Amino acid sequence: MGRPAPSTRRRAATRRRSRNRRRQAPRATWRSAVLVTLLVVAAFCLAGLTWRVLHAPVEAVRIAGDLTRVEHEEVRAAVVATLQSAMTSVSDIAAAIENLDWARDASVRRVWPQTLQVWVERAAITARWGEDHYLTTGGDVVAAPEPPLEALPNLSGTLSSGAETMRVYEMLSDRLAAHGIGLTSLEETDLGGWRLTLDTGATVLLGAEDLAGRIDRVLIVYEDALRDRTHEVARLDARYGSGVAVRWRPDGERPMAGDEALAKVAGK
């Protein structure tokens, strides 16, 4: 017999290739299925590992910042309380710390796997509050720093809160500072009146009403009659409807009696 025609050979080759593809197709499908299964399993394993790492219990809390012992413990308590929630982020912990009255800012980061690094900035302290506490700029009462701060004004409020007392202090100190006078102490009496101590050592009594008007009246007296004699003044009493009574220091010059001083100022 002679050789098959070329067209016959081409058809035979095509049929062989088709049979080979049909035999290989199941193997390729099986390999793809195995590969997909392995990828899914790996993804689940990675997700589980990530979840365990992200939710690993915190075993150590490192707190940094210029804090008192009491404040340090308050921060730790806030962190521990927040960690009791099932889904807690570092943002949640920072927010809980910033809710503390004295805390101005907080940042929290996780040092893997089980340590929290906490940094806290306290609000600026403006004044002493009573004997054992301080006031922040916002009027929040905080524990005394260690060591205690020096050269701060002393504030105390019998009826007013720290924030209210701070507002009175700022109003009065701003007016006095405009005339070069420092305010070293502000005290609210049991009846709601205010007693000031100036950096000259003189005491100013303002009462409970019209504080701005009364301190302005004191400053008029200061500019007109007392600027060059502040070291002689023991007390200025502006609780009157008009005028200011001046009490001189025992060892100071007394050019006029108390009634004469009151009459002089009232006639301004």
Image (cartoon, helix red, strand yellow):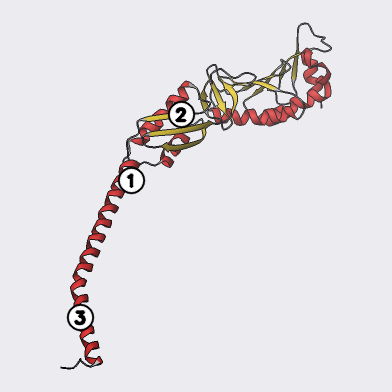
Q: Label 3 near label 1: C-beta < 8 Å?
A: no
Q: Label 2 near label 1: C-beta < 8 Å?
A: no
| CA neighbours of label 2 inside 10 A, class few (<14), some (14 to 19), many (20+) | some
Q: Which residue bears the numbered disc 2? A: 63
- Please tell me which of labels 1 and 2 falls first in the chain: 1
The reply, left or right, for residue 68 in relation to residue 173 is: left
Q: Which residue bears the numbered disc 1? A: 50
Tag 2, which secondary structure? strand
Q: Is residue 62 above or below residue 145?
A: below
Numbered badge on residue 16? 3
Tag 1, which secondary structure? helix
Q: Residue at x 25, y 64 (%)?
A: 32
The mark lying in front, picked from 1 and 3, is: 3
The mark lying in front, picked from 3 and 2, is: 3
Q: Position of residue 186 (x, y in %)?
A: 63, 22
Q: In this orientation, does residue 209 appear? A: no
The reply, left or right, for residue 172 in relation to residue 53 is: right
Q: Position of residue 15 (x, y in %)?
A: 20, 83
Q: In this orientation, does residue 162 appear? A: yes
Q: Is residue 266 above or below residue 56?
A: above
Q: Residue at x 20, y 86 (%)?
A: 12
Q: Nearer the viewer, residue 145 or 40?
A: 40
| CA neighbours of label 3 inside 10 A, class few (<14), some (14 to 19), many (20+) | few
Query: Where is residue 210, by image quadrant?
Result: top right
- Please tell me which of labels 3 and 2 falls first in the chain: 3
